[in-house]
Amino acid sequence: MSPQSPPNTRKIALLDLDAFFASAEVLRDPSLRERPFAVGGGSERGVVATANYLARQYGVRSAMSGTHARRLCPHLHFVSPDHRYYRELSKQVLAVLQKVTDRVEPASIDEFYLDLTDNLQFHGSASLTMHAVRDELRKLGLTASAGISCQKMVAKIASEEQKPDGQFVVPPDDVVAYIAQLSLKRIPGVGPKSLERLQHAGFYTGKDIQQAALERLQRLLGDKAGWLLQQRCNGIDLRPVVTERIRKSVGCEETLRHDLQHLRQVEQFLDEVLLPQLKKRLGQSRWQDTQIKNQTVKLKFSDFQQTTVSRTAKTVSPSLFYQLLRDAWDRREQRGVRLVGLSVALPDPDEQLQLELELD
């Protein structure tokens, strides 16, 4: 996009690969196409990473335990994930997208933003361009859905309208009206806790937020999040497509072989497993060499509920991780701990442009 382009003249698309891990496995084993299967672990400790659409008809969903998935679909087949293979396939998808524009932002391994504002192919039509892109991806054996609008948030939401293997356009003049009729649970960044808080206060749709007093939203969600939610719901999203992604966080987490019932066991796991992993991923020989914004500990309990505790920090402090762990442990309510995670948030030199909803 030209820096001088007005926001409502932009053409932003979000391409979302349909059930990507599952589709990738079908490429290697076409017999999977006709049977319900999930990528992930089917054991007592396993978790579903994704499921094909046949399995989804039984209610199998991402982040579900393997045992629960088998109860819903007794003949469900499990495939172990191969992340190296998925990354290589994702790179092939990126190469296809870069044939139509050099302004491509990988949002994740299976989602890509494209800025098609200055694209002259297909008579400058973003819709025709995305049809052509999706046709090219079919040659790789992959289907994808796309959303097209003048901004990122609406493009992302629109990509969900015609899944799988479809696309949906929200013209600039329709953006505010489109957001107005959306349930707030469809607004990126509005998680379960924030949704509950908003609904309890009488906010259910984008229109409710558009008409709300800003001060009331800020009392509910905090100054930044309340302001940002109202901006987004009023169709204001100036974030550009960023071709060079800045790493925002570094972390590691592990699902344990057995639920841990004692704090000392979890502290030992941090000391022997997670802290060495985190130091390796940061690539620093000394913690104080890494400038950060905060540190976070995550615990997932035996009932699959989870909690996170964060504190502001300028450099990594192992002792702070232990303090955060103790704070999180106090919330367990006699439940065992099945997963432990550590992460640090890194400074973002362009934070205003990269601002995201983080209401939960």
Image (tube, rainbow, N blue to C red):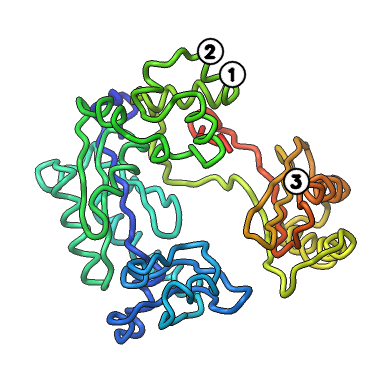
The answer for how far apart the CA atoms under marks 1 and 3 are is 34 Å
Q: Residues within 10 Å of mark 1 (few under 14, many from 20)?
A: few
Is tag 2's residue or tag 3's residue first in the polypeptide sequence? 2
Q: Foreground: 128 or 203?
A: 203
- Residue 147 located left or right of residue 39: left
Q: Secondary structure at mark 3?
A: loop
In the image, which disc is placed on residue 290?
3
Name, please, the residue furthest toward the left. Answer: 123
The three-letter code of the residue at mark 1 reads Arg
- Asked whether the residues under the numbered discs 1 and 3 touch, taking CB atoms below 8 Å apart as contact, a structural biologist would say no
In the rendered structure, the answer to whether residue 129 lies left or right of residue 242 reads left
Left or right, residue 83 beside residue 13: right
Q: Position of residue 4 (x, y in %)?
A: 31, 24
Q: CA distance from mark 2 to mark 1?
A: 6 Å
Q: Label 3 amino acid?
A: Thr
- Using residue 197 as the reference point, say whether residue 99 is left or right of it: left
Please, what is the three-letter code of the amino acid marked with disc 2?
Answer: Glu
From the top left corner, tell me how far across and down residue 144 is, in percent.
27, 59
Q: Which residue is mark 1?
A: 219
* Secondary structure of residue under mark 1: helix
Q: Quadrant of the N terminus?
A: top left
Q: Quadrant of residue 260?
A: bottom right
Residue 50 figure quarter: bottom left
Cβ atoms under marks 2 and 1 closer than 8 Å: yes
* Residue 243, horizontal then vertical, whole percent: 42, 46
Q: Hey, which quadrant is residue 335 in on the image?
A: bottom right
For the point 33% across and 42% down, which residue is it? 157
N-term mark: 1 or 3: 1
Residue 5 lies, in percent from the top left, at: 28, 26
Q: Which residue is mark 2?
A: 215
SS for callout 2 = helix
Disc nearest the viewer among 1 and 3: 1
